[in-house]
Image (cartoon, rainbow, N blue to C red):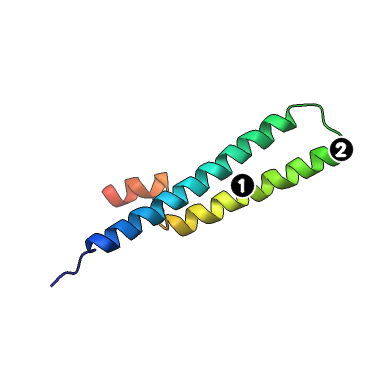
């Protein structure tokens, strides 16, 4: 007998996915903002701070993505190998 998600389980999973997507959007928006700031005239101190924050946001988005959506697609070369 196969067990599926109950209505409550489905709701909880949907809420979790929604929260993770909201976090990903927030990180993406921060990355865009930092990139725009880097295109402006900044002092060296300001530039180093923004670059550090940009790296932190990129790492956060990579970490959250891999934890929230733990699946990978095969590399392009391996697709043709599995098909033939």
Q: Is residue 26 left or right of residue 71?
A: right
Q: Is residue 10 left or right of residue 58?
A: left
- Under circle 1, the secondary element is helix
Q: Nearer the viewer, residue 45 or 78?
A: 45
User: Quadrant of the image for the N terminus?
Assistant: bottom left
Q: Please identify the residue farthest to the top as the structure is shown.
A: 40
From the top left corner, tell me how far across and down residue 17 is, in percent: 39, 53
C-beta proximity under 8 Å, tags 2 and 1: no
- Label whose residue precedes the other's in the sequence (2 or 1): 2
Residue 74 visible somewhere in the drawing:
no
From the top left corner, tell me how far across and down residue 11 is, in percent: 30, 57
Name the mark on residue 44.
2
Which residue sits at x=67%, y=50%? Answer: 56
Residue 66 visible somewhere in the drawing:
yes
Total count of labels: 2
Determine which residue is flagged by label 1. Answer: 58
């Amino acid at each position: 007998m196969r067990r599926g998600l109950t209505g409550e389980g489905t709701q909880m999973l949907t809420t979790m996915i929604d929260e993770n997507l909201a976090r990903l959007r927030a990180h993406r928006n921060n990355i865009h903002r930092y990139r725009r700031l880097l295109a402006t005239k900044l002092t060296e101190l300001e530039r180093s701070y923004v670059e550090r924050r940009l790296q932190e946001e990129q790492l956060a988005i990579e970490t959250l993505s891999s934890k929230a959506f733990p699946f990978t697609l095969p590399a392009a070369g391996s697709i043709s190998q599995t098909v033939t």
